[in-house]
Amino acid sequence: MRILHVIPWLAQRYGGPAISVPQASVGLAQRGHHVEIVTTNIDRPGVLDVPTGRVIDWDGAAAMFHPISVPSRYITSWSMLDDLRRRASTFDVIHIHYLYRFPGLAAASVARSQGVPYVIQAHGSLDPWHRQQKRWQKDLYHALIEDSIICGASAMVCTSRPEELSIRDLGYTVPTWVIPIGIDANELRAPGVPDFAVATGIGVDARVVTFLGRISAKKGVPLLVESFQSTAAAFPRAHLVIAGPDDEGIGRGLMPMIASAGLADRVSFLGVVGGSEKRTLLQRSDVFVLASADESFGIAVAEAMAVGCPVVVSPDVAIEDVVRASGAGLVVERDPSAIAHAIAMILSEPVRAAAMGEAGRRTVDERFSLPIVAAQLEAMYGAVVSASRRRAGRSIAAKAPTSTTGIWGGPAFRCPCCGNVLAPGASNAKWNCEACGWTGSAAGGIPILLPEPAMAEHDELDHHHAHGHKAAQAAHFDRPGEEAFEIDRPHGTPRLYRFLLAEKFRRAVGPIRPHLVGASALTVCGGSGMDAEFLARAGAAVTTSDLSLGAATRAKARSEQYGLGIQSIVADVEHLPYADQSADLVAVHDGLHHLDDPFAGLSEMARVARRWVVVTEPARASITRVAIRLGLALETEEAGNRVARMEPSEVAAFLEASGYVVLRAERYAMYYPHHPGAVLSLLSRPFVFPIVRVGWRLANALLGRFGNKMVVVAERRTQAE
């Protein structure tokens, strides 16, 4: 594969990804891939002394630096944009590092315009601590720019499980891959600088306590300095080394406290260290401390572990679970006395400290080594590229996906009357139940599996049937173009209309979105297959069911038109023709409210689902009663069926009683006409839509809990093998 990394900077002062991205590139190149890095020459307050506009060797990786432009605060580089426009299409996948910067915006925009899949690695930018910094500015930036970039990504790369959970908590539905930062243990264990102690003023017999990283309050440097007063008193040879850029002036601000404590000659600030100096410092350290308030991984911690140095970390460092489980160090609260106690324990117990060091080395070799991480990145890129090619129609002719749960084939069908297993039925053939005598048929390759086959005559468009709907509505629904609209919807509709429908889907599958790839899904009351299409495009193998043969036929036409591989059947949600726990996911969107007893349909959904049930329905709400009076909502739909609005707490309680754990149960505000019309077209104009989208999101953030829509997502406690 041809892989392109886009990152705002590679200067050592920025640490973390500036070091790990070139290392990962080398690891991928060793596996036979062509890998390049595109970046800028920024190195505040100046720039790096490197050639620009051509590929050079940077720590063994192929990198092209571009000059920084105005506005430099945004890490703007117009030269980079031109380069991406010229060369992006020659790569199979683009890996974007960091949010809120020009390089990410430029790379995502070009990738989408040229049809190149891209993945995003936020490097902790979406963690709770970071999101709280400049919150309103970030919320506005997300609404106007960043959310569309994230939602357009083929995947998001997380370096730890906590980072993944933070992203999920924000409601993003992009598939996530948890891949740690690769550590070049061999380079870190190479011989260090012989005269390092003399050059830095650290005594040859000193007990070295080390911090390595940006000097900031978030990373706990003031806490460490305060705790070192106790360490210095208990261990006369203890020496604190703080290495990293002091861009915030935190280090300078700590000097008076250090001097007043009489520790000026026992605390060293080394500035930025890298290469041989960094590995010498880590090798020389007796204990490494990172008491950070937020860390999406903890590269410096892993590097210290790689050379056998015991570590002390706070619970907010993402790999604290690795430290704890492996025994590579101690996990303590962000409190000076707790930090001092942990340091003292390691310095006073050499045997235990040696065991911690060995555990750290072993853990890095087994979990974070470059070859292991490179293989994980390779797998992720391969999956992204393959999925992109399938969507673009560049792979072998589409086939209906196969399911591990048996929902696709004839043998999976059960009699909708008695539940007896049905023998396989061919296209346009019949199914006969030997137990109760029920007979099912097929029309146009669509199985009709209803307790009363005549029910299939119901069509959501014609309404000429005997189920209480108004035949007078036939003229309204049969007008020219209606069938084509139902097959294509939301394709070809205004942008705001598409956004609102996508937002409903996002809320419906948010907690389970990463697990949809390869899962079997059944949509009930599925209509013309719009929700089935959303699920199929998310990677699920989908069967869509509806009481109406006309709707099922349109769903089949949708699948064929867009190459979705969706299976379409006619079935009644109150008598689903499947065995218990047959499909990974059973979902409904605005279907249960048609029933006299919505919970009868929900009971069937809970029975057939193997893992998840998703319910999106109208909610009982004061705003709905107002909308009915204003004519914006209906108590009885045009087709004659009443709207049985539901309460999310009641649905959640029902599913919990059925053996499920509720992952999401919430209200939100949603309104759009079935047909977009002129108003939505107006609100979808380029300069209007971003404002409307921000307003809609803000309104939901403030008033969504009183909204007219509800969604419940639940997962079965125990699943069938």
Image (spheres, helix red, strand yellow):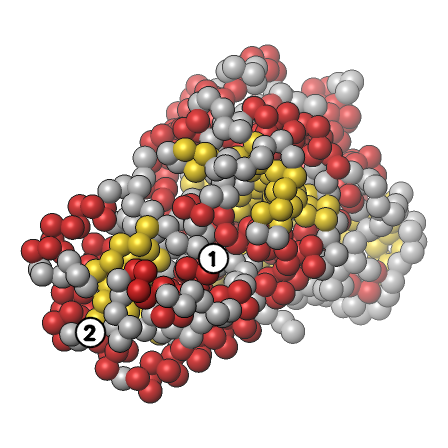
Q: Amino acid at mark 2?
A: Arg
Q: Quadrant of residue 179?
A: bottom right
Element type at mark 1: helix
Q: Position of residue 11 (x, y in %)?
A: 47, 43
- Give the mark count: 2
Where, quadrant-wise, is the C terminus in this rendering? Answer: bottom right
**Extreme-left residue of the structure:** 260
Q: Amino acid at mark 1?
A: Gly
Q: CA distance from mark 1 to mark 2?
A: 27 Å
Q: Position of residue 365 (x, y in %)?
A: 54, 72
Q: Residues within 10 Å of mark 1 (few under 14, many from 20)?
A: some
Identify the residue shown where x is 75% and y is 60%.
403
The circle drawn on residue 237 is 2
Q: Position of residue 536 (x, y in %)?
A: 70, 46
Nearest to the observer: residue 609 or residue 331: 331
Q: Is residue 584 in view from this perspective?
A: no
Circles 1 and 2 in contact, beta carbons < 8 Å: no
The circle drawn on residue 94 is none
Q: Residues within 10 Å of mark 2 (few under 14, many from 20)?
A: some
Element type at mark 2: loop
Nearest to the observer: residue 535 or residue 139: 139
Along the polypeptide, which appears first: circle 1 or circle 2? 2
The circle drawn on residue 275 is 1
Identify the residue shown where x is 44% and y is 80%.
358
